Amino acid sequence: MSRRHCRVACINHHCSGTVKTAGVGHHVDYLLDTNPVLVTNFLKYLVAISTWYASTESLAKLAICLLYKQLFPQRAIHILVNITIAVLIAASVAGGLADLFGCTPFSAHWGTPAEQAAHCIDTEALFVWGSFPNIVTDIVLLVIPIPVVLRLQASTGLKVGLMITFLFGSM
């Protein structure tokens, strides 16, 4: 078996193992009746995944910020990009820490809904307000190149093409 096929087999085995150990693909009511340990395992995975996501979701936007710092030499843009970088880093750190330490004791992350309500922060509010900085930084990163492109001494077609490029690049 080639090295490539071995990797696919290992990846597929890992995925099927995760499905077996966390009950992914089954209704939670069924799992609670038949094997509640799988629900607990799923919630443990969820803590790890949500913490990882909250901590790393802004990496692509940070890369765009660094690109903008190279493309646009204007001081005002550099200040705006630096502020955006600070907001992205602060939101990532805060989101990761809130996800990780949102329950006391830590095991309340995978406790019953009553235990989670009593010992954990309001995750719904965390998700709503945690997405606010991401929305703001998305808008800022979409708007930054517009004045620069509009001031270019170039044809309208080229300006439109650049605007479309920046908009698609942000997706």
Image: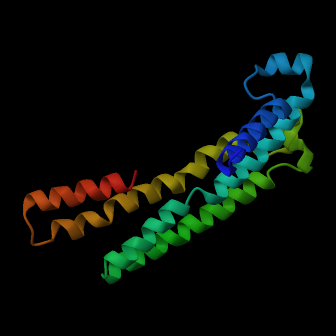
Residue drawn at the location 34% of the way across and 83% of the way down = 75
Viewer-proximal residue among 116 and 52: 52
What percent of the width, then of the height, locates residue 25? 72, 24
Q: In this rendering, would 7 be left or right of 101? A: left
Q: Is residue 118 left or right of residue 63?
A: right
Q: Quadrant of residue 29?
A: top right
* Colour scheme: rainbow
Q: Residue 131: give x, y in percent of width and height.
A: 56, 49
Q: Position of residue 134 (x, y in %)?
A: 51, 55
Residue at the spot x=25%, y=63% of the render? 146
Q: How many marks?
A: 0
Quarter the N terminus occupies: top right
Residue drawn 67% across and 43% down? 5
When the figure is inspected, residue 79 is found, relative to residue 131, above or below; the finding is below
> Residue lying furthest front in this view?
1
- Horizontal side of residue 123 vs 39, given as left or right: left
Residue 117 visible in the picture: no
Q: Specify the quadrant of the image occupied by residue 156.
A: bottom left
Report the front residue among 51 and 121.
51
Q: Is residue 28 left or right of residue 95?
A: right
Question: Where, by quadrant of the figure, is residue 127 drawn?
Answer: top right
Q: Is residue 95 above or below residue 85?
A: above
Which residue is rendered at x = 81% and y = 36% of the image?
17
Above/below status of 156 relative to 15: below
Q: Is residue 146 at least partly visible in the picture? A: yes
Residue 76, position as x, y percentages in the image = 34, 79
Q: Depth check: 78 or 115 in front?
A: 78
